[in-house]
Image: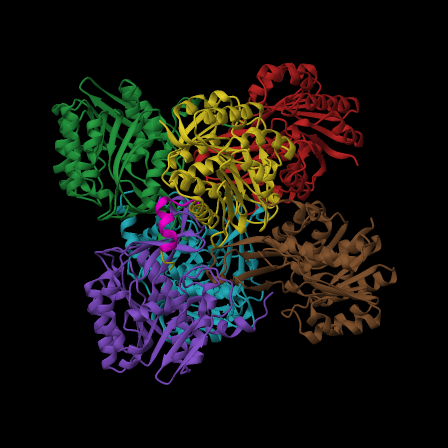
Chain colours: A yellow, B purple, C green, D cyan, E brown, F red
Amino acid sequence: MTVDVLTFGETMAVLRATTPGPLRLARSLDLALAGAESTVAIGLSRLGHRARWVGRVGADEFGALVVERLLAERVDVVAHEDPAAPTGLLVREQRTADLARVAYYRAGSAGSRLSPDDLREPLRDGARVLLVSGITPALSDTARAATEAAVAHAVAHGWAVCLDVNHRSKLWTREEASDVLTPLAAVATTVFGDQSELDLVGGRESLLAKGVGDVVTKRGAEGAETTTPTGHWATSAAPTTVTDVIGAGDAFVAGYLSALLDGLGPAERLARGTAVAATAIATTGDWEGLPTRAELLTLHGETKR
Amino acid sequence: MTVDVLTFGETMAVLRATTPGPLRLARSLDLALAGAESTVAIGLSRLGHRARWVGRVGADEFGALVVERLLAERVDVVAHEDPAAPTGLLVREQRTADLARVAYYRAGSAGSRLSPDDLREPLRDGARVLLVSGITPALSDTARAATEAAVAHAVAHGWAVCLDVNHRSKLWTREEASDVLTPLAAVATTVFGDQSELDLVGGRESLLAKGVGDVVTKRGAEGAETTTPTGHWATSAAPTTVTDVIGAGDAFVAGYLSALLDGLGPAERLARGTAVAATAIATTGDWEGLPTRAELLTLHGETKR
Amino acid sequence: MTVDVLTFGETMAVLRATTPGPLRLARSLDLALAGAESTVAIGLSRLGHRARWVGRVGADEFGALVVERLLAERVDVVAHEDPAAPTGLLVREQRTADLARVAYYRAGSAGSRLSPDDLREPLRDGARVLLVSGITPALSDTARAATEAAVAHAVAHGWAVCLDVNHRSKLWTREEASDVLTPLAAVATTVFGDQSELDLVGGRESLLAKGVGDVVTKRGAEGAETTTPTGHWATSAAPTTVTDVIGAGDAFVAGYLSALLDGLGPAERLARGTAVAATAIATTGDWEGLPTRAELLTLHGETKR
Amino acid sequence: MTVDVLTFGETMAVLRATTPGPLRLARSLDLALAGAESTVAIGLSRLGHRARWVGRVGADEFGALVVERLLAERVDVVAHEDPAAPTGLLVREQRTADLARVAYYRAGSAGSRLSPDDLREPLRDGARVLLVSGITPALSDTARAATEAAVAHAVAHGWAVCLDVNHRSKLWTREEASDVLTPLAAVATTVFGDQSELDLVGGRESLLAKGVGDVVTKRGAEGAETTTPTGHWATSAAPTTVTDVIGAGDAFVAGYLSALLDGLGPAERLARGTAVAATAIATTGDWEGLPTRAELLTLHGETKR
Amino acid sequence: MTVDVLTFGETMAVLRATTPGPLRLARSLDLALAGAESTVAIGLSRLGHRARWVGRVGADEFGALVVERLLAERVDVVAHEDPAAPTGLLVREQRTADLARVAYYRAGSAGSRLSPDDLREPLRDGARVLLVSGITPALSDTARAATEAAVAHAVAHGWAVCLDVNHRSKLWTREEASDVLTPLAAVATTVFGDQSELDLVGGRESLLAKGVGDVVTKRGAEGAETTTPTGHWATSAAPTTVTDVIGAGDAFVAGYLSALLDGLGPAERLARGTAVAATAIATTGDWEGLPTRAELLTLHGETKR
Amino acid sequence: MTVDVLTFGETMAVLRATTPGPLRLARSLDLALAGAESTVAIGLSRLGHRARWVGRVGADEFGALVVERLLAERVDVVAHEDPAAPTGLLVREQRTADLARVAYYRAGSAGSRLSPDDLREPLRDGARVLLVSGITPALSDTARAATEAAVAHAVAHGWAVCLDVNHRSKLWTREEASDVLTPLAAVATTVFGDQSELDLVGGRESLLAKGVGDVVTKRGAEGAETTTPTGHWATSAAPTTVTDVIGAGDAFVAGYLSALLDGLGPAERLARGTAVAATAIATTGDWEGLPTRAELLTLHGETKR
């Protein structure tokens, strides 16, 4: 079955401290899942699009947790169960009200062992958009190969290719990332990143010069902007009470892509991206607060009590 | 025994999500009680007034929860236990940090079966003030009849009649509400509402023209104002850290009525109303944070640590 | 797609007290889902069978909770969203360590409005086994009609028909239940019940005489037994530490049907039924502890630590 | 107003660890109230009797906690608010599954400052039964004087006098307790205690010889027995799953007194005492699980699910 | 062993409500420890200094809680276990989001029984800085004598003497405090206080005139300033999201003293004090959020995610 | 400083599910620490012995958690902070009330990188007893070398050498374990294991023949027994309510060694071992419930309430 959006990557179990303070003083941690690509997939699915997520998980309870949640969200899941490696783990400390710190138990994880073979069938089944995160090629040599093969396939078949740079400094240096991601960005149709991430793949002007159709700058609390060959659009962030900023960037991408799939123009894409992000950060958790299509309509219309 | 304030209505068990996010992802819900009139009664009782609440509850644990809490608060409770209907239930989702959504399980509930008979004895026992909420006549035909009988009795016996419009769009339309509440407002001595609610019962000028002595506009974070035949007074909201805005309007009414019972003028009534509301919204829960008379004095005098 | 087992009924949101004591003293309630048929469907799905569940839910968060969990469990869900009625609610009090009491908010619920139309397509798609619970025909006239139509269809097409009597005294009397369920039992291939429930549909001997192939007596802590035209088999319950007995009967049915689908004989069916039940009652919750196929193999072989 | 039972003593706030282990490792403690006499008063009130409790509390939140719970339970509360002393505090560690240890913060507490004056009016108002706990006279000189005055008043007015010996070794020695309690026991109509406590006030034979009409031995898991001038009755404990044994003795006294007030004979008194105790220990908390009159009837009749 | 900083005082177990609202409605309280001097000692120890804390605790679990936490924090603990008095207790209500109220169970506590003897050996062992809180001399006559002896010893041996005025109005009046603390302040090298507290010990000018080398004004959200014979320095508070302001003053003192021990000048001392305070108040709890030396370096450099 | 007992190994952070059921359904996990050797060290320290634990931890919060707890327990901690590897993690699922399952994130962990160098100084400082667990040599080549070096050193210096076989089948096979542990057992003075573990190192008779002075069989709920050249002693387990059996074996070893250090004979050693184990398993957690020396005396003498 052809889907609207195909994405792939590593989704981990996440253990989150619920109260600000040093992790060593925590008494219990909340259990959930975390992965940039699966967050976007959930966001798209809630907005009514068909999203397929491909990845590897361990033959363990944390892998089951990941798969079951994506199934519940009606994401089309292609989860390869790896008998030889565990599901990765992310431990998130809320050191202060303003600062989250993360520790990974993902070296050698099932998710990092993603390979080109894992994507073969999903690529054959087709998609309108391929969404690639810059995290995946940093996980392992096979994951990088898988990423490059997917982009090549999408380009060859005329799909839209969206790259979210997502630089993770714990996984690789800017130089390493730049070497791998710049060629991918050059062939993308849409590139997402904050200012520093866009610079890492050559900068906005260079990307447009190479033919990228849409260079989107995520500016956090300041909003977002996009530049296309024909113009420049900007929006401020939607006003909201901030509960948990983690996942805001992925929520924005989900909203932006949703509008793209609906054939909307740059201003509407930015508007939906910031609306989805605003809803997401006004709740606890990375993906939990993502709005459904119905909520997208009502969240502003509905009267607060 | 004659009381200071007589009120009546439906008080339900409430199940509240404690973390912002979609209710379907909640793992547990907090159990409490909710009812506009009982919140005012608790507020008045804590401030040292004798408040009587009349209502129906089911012969079940949720009914016991309602009655026991009101007893604990020293409210004079006249609770008719209905063997044939359950206590109503309100489920409150905190969809985002800024938006609460509610679902009711109150169709056919014990509370909605309130009837004129239930009020006969409490009306005979007397009160200085009758407090009527615009929610009650929306619950059922018998509840509307009870409301109308109560107002008629109070008017006939020269009690003050305070009407809080409290339009609930899930229960009836503005047109339906207007038909029922406008005649009640016309004979009231004090009418409370936000701008839109006051319009629903004819608007401020019309009410004053009909002889209402005190038309009070609740303006939320912007404060409150009152108009009487002799003048207009306004106050801003008392500064506070907002924890939970639900119940703020009822808290304001409790404070305002308390000052009225103490014989204070419009400015002092507004001041106490906003002070009580400020204390209430700086805590979690509809009624939990309402101040005692002693706290009313000390909460500003007492040095924060 | 033809499935292994087709079942249908009402699945509600359940609010459970976590500590023994009167519900009115509870501070919070756990949120989950509950439904005899969906518990069996989850059990079958975890054991590797294709199970389809058909039902109605409200257009609300509790309905979403039900559907999302079933999707996560890989149950094939046919959930009709009813715009005019809420998802039913079950409140469960653990009055003492030994006694659970329930209150229903299911009158007029979406689930009770199940109708023959809702089953038309799933029946056409086919199944090897139709599993019917005696709860469903007690919910409403349309639900009874749907049940009768489903059984008639299954008989006409030569499917196995399994009836779990499941008498709920809060929904109807023994006489009412007997009138409706006895004809259904008469055409079933397998009938489940405790001694009293089997008596309600005519008793073991009568059922066998009418041609029921398998009359299974659930005897709780004493185990289970089955009688077929060719013999009688009995098993004691598997030894376990009891955590939560609710759902034990449904777990037993899931295990028994699983063995039936695998073509196993009466003794093996009883053995798997009691093994699945033992695993389920050694955990908290109705369905949470149901074993996977892999766990069925390892739970006894695996060394405790 | 004359009540059925008048009792008095110290009720404290209690902070309870919820998990077995050393208290120093606990992360949070549950907040409730504890007092032998108030537990009996709650038990009697739930069974439909008019019970009055007299005591002192501090002008603080813990005092409010005590009073509000008793009001909620419909106990007739005469709570003297002591501006000069705090409400006492009891910290309860569940050191192991089998062993609870307590620490008191009650030296100089408001409750221990109970005086004869505090009882003057309640004694004048009358009661059918005076219930005295052997804890109260150990609290302070004034509390002992109050106890002695109350017993003298009751004897003089022909009320029944029930003494529960309740020896607390942290408050006084057996010798000290014996000196004070033996004379009180001698004039009582009913004396409760375990074997060792009855010995402390002279032993069963001595008490009967002095004219005590009813000497009741609490034997914990072994049940209870009573001896009167005309005979001896014994009962075993009602079977139940034990959740929390604390408060069992007080629950037994409540049940026994309830039957006494209903005019029942020794066997029925023992039966109700053990039934009430069984219900109480099958829930968490000292008083939370005490049955209502309705539950007394249904808890055995109602089918477990 | 000579330490960097010697301090002494009473550290209590603290029971904290976790949700804003009246304490009487709380269901559970968090258990931790609280003491101004031990908070400073923890802060200094985390920043790499050797801090010794001397005090008395009861022979109970709360005493063990205090000692074990300080050991875990690598504070050099000299805890005299008092067999005759319990560890003090502090109950903290979060009445509203903006107002915490405290109740003490510390009359006659072990901590208040601190005596000159308890300090003899620690004083002999030596320290670079003696840190004295104005709370300690308010606890008892012996605690005052111990404080005065410690200051005299420190002055005699040429240690730096830092006094944090810390006026507690629940323990003594301003006049009582002034009589005791003014002479101590006069011989100190550094005095900390808010404006009102500095006035209580004579005021800034007077202190400088008497030879105090460093008069530090804590100005809360407005920052801090210090005056020495050679100049005046001020700093604003470091920007942060406020989670829990309690302990901010002690955190500031820890940071300020840390810089003093590192030989830094007034501006750097103020900077570190406000940085440590900012980190502490952005977490829950008095001492939990205090930064380590490594965190002091990274908390601003580390990129938020 | 010479200590009573020197031990070493890997202590991990542990994340434990608090409710029985599949881990993937857990919402939060409790955070603690786990390690056989550190549990014994805590047990010995609480009983008043000087115990030193040597190990490696990551430069992370979980490492800090391990070290801080051991410091709090007054264990002499020699913790090498490994900048290049994280602290190991153990995830414990309570699949059913009777079955715990574990998953490790310890491959390449800091703890597994223990090397002979890490032990050099602690060995030089001396000890009366060296306690070796059979887990440590399974962690890595360097950990095995460290273990062998430690045993050789202890033998050479005439210390007692106690080996707890502790076979972990997730780390190595019985054959691998036997090859490494049999030579170590041969030179030990005391060997602990269950029947199967003792067989793995040659069996009781063989060990005694090789000169082991004390072969102790742990028999779980059946108790324990020991054989020495001069006789055989056995004891049944101390009666207790079982809360959490994990850690029972380590608790037994701590009690046994404590008696050995006190110079007691085989019967007393078994008695203390089973008493300590009984106390530990009557609480939640591996090490939390271990008794202090004072509790060892009072836990049976103190009257249960």
Q: Position of residue A187 (x, y in %)?
A: 52, 30
Q: Is residue B292 at all visible to an observer of this figure?
A: no
Please state which of residues E272 and F148 is positioned toward the viewer in this rendering.
E272
Side of F259 where B291 appears, left or right: left
> Residue at image x 21%, y 38%?
C136
Residue D305 drawn in magenta: no
Side of B43 where A143 appears, left or right: right
Please state which of residues D135 and B124 is positioned toward the viewer in this rendering.
B124
Q: Main secondary structure of the magenta part?
A: helix
User: How many labels, in total?
Assistant: 0
Q: Is residue F229 at all visible to an observer of this figure?
A: yes
Side of D213 where F163 appears, left or right: right
Image quadrant in which you'd find residue A198: top right
Residue A294 drawn in magenta: yes
Residue at the extreme right of the image, as rendered: E157
Q: Position of residue D6 (x, y in %)?
A: 39, 67
Residue at the extreme bottom of the image, as rendered: B230
Q: Position of residue B300 (x, y in %)?
A: 54, 72
Please state which of residues B160 and B6 is positioned toward the viewer in this rendering.
B160
Side of F25 where A106 appears, left or right: right
Q: Position of residue F236 (x, y in %)?
A: 54, 30
Image quadrant containing the N terminus of chain C? top left
Magenta segment range?
A288-301
| In the image, residue F43 above or below residue F219 | below
Please state which of residues C50 and C144 is positioned toward the viewer in this rendering.
C50
| In the image, residue D105 above or below residue B184 | above
| In the image, residue A75 above or below residue A80 | below
